Amino acid sequence: MNVLLVAATSAEVQPIVDRLAGPNPLSSARTRLNHRHHQIDVLVTGVGMVATAVWCTKTLAESRPDLALNVGVCGSFSSTFQPGTVLHVVSDCLPELGAEDEEGFLTIQDLGLLGQDEPPYRSGRLVNIAPPAIPALTRLPQAHGITVNTTHGHEPSIRRIVERWSPDVESMEGAAFMYACITVGVSFAQVRAVSNRVERRDRGSWKVTEAIASLTDVAMLLVGDL
């Protein structure tokens, strides 16, 4: 199987590479590994939805993998998903895409600005309607995400985004990855580990190292089940 493994930063995916192929520092945006009978291309896109959309679309169009996996960390809005929890993000959206209307907000769906060739949205969300049948994936808790340019760290804006979208988690790349995969027609899954609660920014309380360790363990189970 040809697998595309996508992460925003090398820090999020390097431990997975080390477990798959031994110490093998990522020296470029794209690295090819052979693991058992699988070919795994590791793509480090850079942070943010623009970089992710560009690099994912380019790579997916060129290589047409059998499966694309997006791995990374995320912030959690939900007390159910504590730091270290690994989730399958089954839907995502771009909550900042739209227009202000006094105190309200109009989505691109409200504005009628979706093109005919754009991926289908359900209630304003991109949904993974046919995730890959990987046993380890089906055992993960499912979550609904939002993808933002500016992560939330101010209580009033956190309240507003929760009221509008009821998200479980947020990242800066997830919806862009999903959009690219849906557009190209590649089976995919977005898998994220919670590194912090979404609250007033307190970097000292974040559990990034622990989240990446949990993410690595789950990634190895996913690859092992292919």
Image: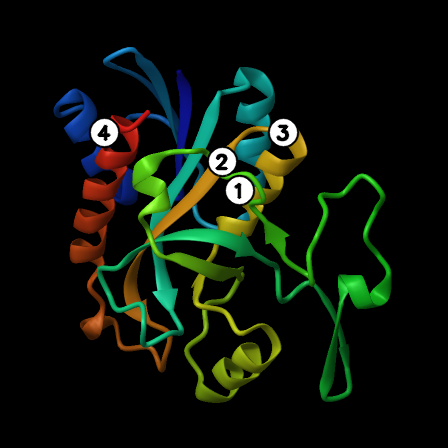
Does residue 124 appear left or right of residue 29 in this picture? right
Does residue 105 appear left or right of residue 42 in this picture? right
Does residue 178 appear left or right of residue 31 in this picture? right
Q: Which residue is mark 2?
A: 188
> With respect to residue 176, does 146 lie above or below?
below
Q: Which residue is mark 1?
A: 177
> With respect to residue 43, does 151 lie above or below?
below
What kind of element bears circle 2? strand
C-alpha span from label 4 to label 2: 19 Å
Query: How many dots with numbers?
Result: 4
Q: Which residue is mark 4?
A: 17
| Neighbourhood count class around disc 4 (C-alpha, 10 Å): few under 14, some 14–19, many 20 upward | many
| Neighbourhood count class around disc 1 (C-alpha, 10 Å): few under 14, some 14–19, many 20 upward | many
- For residue 185, the mark is 3
Looking at the rendered structure, the kind of residue marked 1 is Phe
Q: Earlier in the sequence, mark 4 or mark 2?
A: 4
Q: Earlier in the sequence, mark 2 or mark 1?
A: 1
Identify the residue at image location x=54%, y=54%: 91
Nearer the observer, 172 or 117: 117
* Marks 1 and 4 in Cβ contact (< 8 Å): no
Identify the residue at image location x=55%, y=50%: 175
**Displayed quadrant of residue 226:** top left
**Displayed quadrant of residue 194:** bottom left
| Neighbourhood count class around disc 2 (C-alpha, 10 Å): few under 14, some 14–19, many 20 upward | many
What kind of element bears circle 4? helix
Looking at the rendered structure, the kind of residue marked 4 is Val
What kind of element bears circle 1? helix
